[in-house]
């Protein structure tokens, strides 16, 4: 199964441009208020607080683009931002049999996918991905695909244990 939200890049660019315009407009209004109008008084700093909150929420939501591919014998996870300045691209590829479990953390403003896999030294690794920008249907498809692979891995482990 393949899952990606790359087709929404123009939408993310649009929203980021709107937020940037709001920040610029609020800074101009703050400067105008402070030096020319002086209408708001002590509430003038709300003009800069609102865009800072918008920028913080956008940053906290994490990387916008999530790509998942489970076709073949390996998983491929890719998580990146639309602007390379704000974070590195995370690319992980590993065999399906190493998947132990997964967890989706659903916080107020963002969602994270935690993948638990076996490493070469029988340690458990946790891989983290931002999935805040996926739709509910995409998240349910992702859950279905991961659960299916985990079920197959558990069945294979039972048959391996019975043969030994």
Image (cartoon, rainbow, N blue to C red):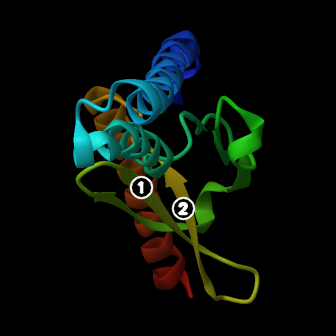
Query: Dot 2: few (<14), some (14–19), or many (≥20) neighbours within 10 Å?
Result: some
Residue 19 versus residue 106 in the image, above or below: above
Residue 57, how many percent across, how many down? 39, 45
| Residue beneath disc 1 | 112
Residue 1 versus residue 124 in the image, above or below: above
Residue 18, how many percent across, how many down? 46, 17
Q: What quarter of the picture does the C terminus occupy?
A: bottom right
Say what secondary structure mark 1 lies in: strand
The quarter holding residue 125 reads bottom right
Residue at screen point 66% across, 88% down: 122
Q: Is residue 157 left or right of residue 75?
A: left
Q: Are marks 1 and 2 in contact (CB under 8 Å)?
A: yes
Nearer the observer, 19 or 48: 48
Q: CA distance from mark 1 to mark 2?
A: 7 Å
Say what secondary structure mark 2 lies in: strand
Q: Is residue 104 left or right of residue 162?
A: left
Residue 17, how many percent across, how many down? 54, 17
| Residue beneath disc 2 | 128
């Amino acid at each position: 199964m393949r899952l990606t939200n790359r087709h929404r890049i123009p939408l993310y660019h649009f929203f980021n441009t709107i937020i940037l315009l709001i920040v610029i407009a609020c800074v101009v209004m703050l400067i105008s208020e402070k030096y020319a109008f002086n209408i708001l008084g002590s509430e003038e700093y709300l003009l800069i607080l609102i865009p800072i909150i918008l920028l913080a929420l956008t940053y906290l939501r994490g990387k916008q683009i999530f790509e998942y591919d489970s076709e073949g014998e390996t998983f491929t996870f890719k998580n990146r931002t639309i602007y390379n300045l704000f974070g590195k691209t995370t690319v992980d590829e590993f065999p399906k049999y190493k998947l132990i479990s997964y967890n989706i953390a659903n916080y107020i403003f963002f969602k994270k996918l935690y993948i638990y896999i076996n490493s070469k030294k029988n340690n458990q690794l946790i891989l983290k991905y931002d999935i805040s920008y996926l739709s509910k249907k995409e998240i349910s498809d992702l859950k279905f695909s991961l659960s299916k692979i985990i079920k197959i891995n558990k069945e294979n482990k039972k048959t391996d244990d019975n043969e030994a």
